[in-house]
Image (cartoon, rainbow, N blue to C red):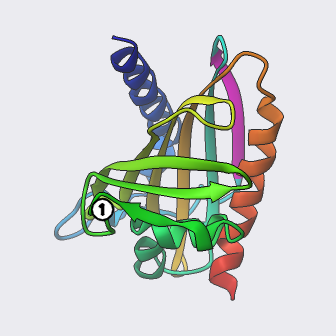
Amino acid sequence: MRAITSLSVVLAGCLTALLWTGSAAAKDHAPGAGDGAARKIKCNDTESVFVLTPIGENQYLSYQRVLIDAPISEVWPVLRDIERFVEAVLPAVAPTFMWLDGGGPETIPSLYQFTAGTDTLLEEIIYRSEEEHQILVRLVEPVLGMQEYYAFGDLNRACGQKTVLEYTRYLELDPGTDVEFFRALFTQEFIDIPAYFDD
């Protein structure tokens, strides 16, 4: 029951983020043949945003948006392949990345792990949409003070052959865990991802 409740919170959080940005997406949408979310174009919503807010006892919702100076055709292959995404946002731990139980970039769901310091994070890709350019991952086992963690990534085309990455995360932390550690980590990740495409 706890897992269902937490998943409901995550989905509600993702919906909140989508509704939060939805009015801009609707205004910036360029209709055309084969119209769909993969054809959304965001021209006015390209400022970087980072919000980390408590939504319950030891529960937090994070929303980040960043403009990447690369077309979606270059950014999506990195976001969809979590091994490449870890290389982009956590380059120090990328060498420890490993697919598990036959998982891989073409298999959904897929388990994977990587090591940060002395801690091994076991995560799973549970959803990916090639058409919508979206991915959802979750933490499988508690670690680093996280009881639960879900991350929903969503790409949208931006004007000028650029891409907007929106990332919504749900965190449930152990009591006493310092949320500022995660604020600093998430901030650094969203400095690293645009820099990855600048190289």
Q: Position of residue 70 (x, y in %)?
A: 55, 81
Q: Is residue 44 above or below residue 1?
A: below
**Residue beneath disc 1:** 103
In the image, what residue occupies the spot 75% across and 64% down? 191
Relative horizontal placement of residue 146, taking residue 5 as reference (left or right): right
Relative horizontal placement of residue 67, taking residue 127 as reference (left or right): right
Label 1 environment density (alpha carbons within 10 Å; few <14, some 14–19, many ≥20) = some
Q: Main secondary structure of the magenta part?
A: strand
Any part of residue 157 in sight: no
In the image, what residue occupies the spot 33% across and 69% down? 105
> As shown in the figure, which amino acid type bears the numbered disc 1?
Gly
Q: In front: 122, or 83?
A: 122
Does the segment drawn in magenta span residue 52?
Answer: yes
Q: In front: 199, or 164?
A: 199
Magenta region: which residues?
Answer: 49-55
Q: Position of residue 147 (x, y in %)?
A: 57, 26
Q: In front: 117, or 149?
A: 117
Q: Position of residue 17 (x, y in %)?
A: 51, 36
